[in-house]
Amino acid sequence: MWSSLVIPTFLFLSFSSVGLAPDPGSATDENDNYPPFWDQTEGDIAEFPVQNNKTIVDPWKYIDRLRIYKILIEESNKYFASFGKNNTGNVLWALTLLYGKLFKTDRFSEPPKSSRCAYESGASSCISVNSGWGGINYYVIIMYFLAAIESEFLGNLPYEVELLSQEEYRSNFCYSVEECHAAYPQVMDIANRFYKYLQSRKIVSTTIGIPQYDTDEDTVIFNMWAVHQAAIDVAKPKISDVLFYVSETERDFTMDFLLAVELVEAVLYCPHFETMTELLVGFPHRLLTDQDHNVLTSNLSRRKKAVMTVAKLTPEINKSTGGLFLTIWKKLMTSKFAQPIGRFLINRLLLIPIE
Ligand SMILES: *[C@@H]1O[C@H](CO)[C@@H](O)[C@H](O)[C@H]1NC(C)=O
Ligand SMILES: *[C@@H]1O[C@H](CO)[C@@H](O)[C@H](O)[C@H]1NC(C)=O
Ligand SMILES: *[C@@H]1O[C@H](CO)[C@@H](O)[C@H](O)[C@H]1NC(C)=O
Ligand SMILES: *[C@@H]1O[C@H](CO)[C@@H](O)[C@H](O)[C@H]1NC(C)=O
């Protein structure tokens, strides 16, 4: 049954906000929206050290994962030129901005509550192998990265890439194209399909000297979210069994949020820079404590409470409808007519004015 507080909270949040003007103070500094240290990376594989003719990547370091995100953004920008100026239309911003947000909000730190791998450690920060978000994010970015290598989306690399593994939970993670293919063939196939689609695009025109490709927006957004979801599907059971969280509230939020993301993905939510920045304003800016368990009395902002409430509500509705809610939502949202309605609903629920 739906917990007695969830529905009133939800109604309160979505209707009490009508007519409130957005807070001008929320217009954040543009540079704050990029992941920390974004400008300190080039998006070039040559930035990684080379040892014994191998490019060495440590995926449990913040900066190394950031370099991977930037490489993928840089290599794919040209296909999205018509979707927004200054490459803001790249569909990979969704993942990249969430990555920065997770770091900024200390979600890669060593649980239960230590400064190890915390945001304040700076550019050289680690990502704790014990952190739930760190593990989930590993699956997402590494599948994208290894499939980009496998499909030769990154061209002919000068050296073979070696991912440094952590001994802890070694068997929970795959560290090479071969290993990931063997363990998660379906995810690697879906990720390869994302790149194969881009590689098959053709230049159809040129605008102020910039070639425009015949990239179909819906197709590429669908493909991008499909990889994300496939990676999360394999990550979730591994992560929920073994990893630690700072509080039960944070752990539940993580799992609920990942389920609510499925609703967002199903409407082919726009993953561009501006829309994702706006959506992520509602992502809790700190780790949740058990005082946040009751969303209404927590001291987070109204926008963040709305996101937490939708996250909380999703599994409850799913459960109380015997799984039908998610199934029907996803089925409905395959229709071009229903998608805008779904997007409207999601924006109405998640983008409530900031007080
Ligand atoms: C690296 O590759 C080059 C060219 O293939 C080779 O000459 C050299 O011995 C290799 N170095 C190491 C450390 O394996
Ligand atoms: C264009 O994007 C880069 C990062 O990709 C950013 O540093 C720069 O400020 C942006 N320029 C404008 C005019 O928005
Ligand atoms: C908000 O709540 C959190 C945890 O419940 C607490 O650590 C923090 O100090 C509170 N902030 C304010 C401004 O009261
Ligand atoms: C959705 O509900 C069904 C039926 O209760 C359940 O089997 C399934 O695990 C739920 N899905 C999630 C992701 O919670």
Image: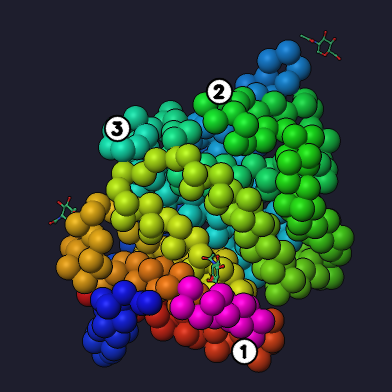
- The residue tagged with tag 1: helix, strand or loop? helix
User: Which quadrant would residue 124 be assigned to in this image?
Assistant: top left
- Disc 3 is placed on an element classified as loop
The residue positioned 20% from the left and 64% from the top of the image is: 298
Residue neighbourhood size for the residue with mark 3, other residues' Cα within 10 Å, grouped as few (<14), some (14–19), many (≥20): few
Task: Please name whichever residue, 154 or 10, is drawn nearer the observer in this view of the structure.
Answer: 10
Number of numbered discs overlaid on the protein picture: 3
Judge from the rendering whether residue 345 lies leftward or rightward of residue 238; answer left or right: left
Q: Which mark is residue 338?
A: 1
117 and 179: which one is in front?
A: 179
Q: Position of residue 285 (x, y in %)?
A: 31, 55
Up-down: is 157 above or below 18?
A: above
Q: Which residues are magenta?
A: 319-333
Which residue is labeled 2 in the image?
167
Residue with the mark numbered 3: 115
N-terminal label among 2 and 1: 2
* Tag 1–tag 3 contact (CB < 8 Å): no
Could you give the CA–CA distance between mark 2 and mark 1, rounded to whole angstroms? 47 Å
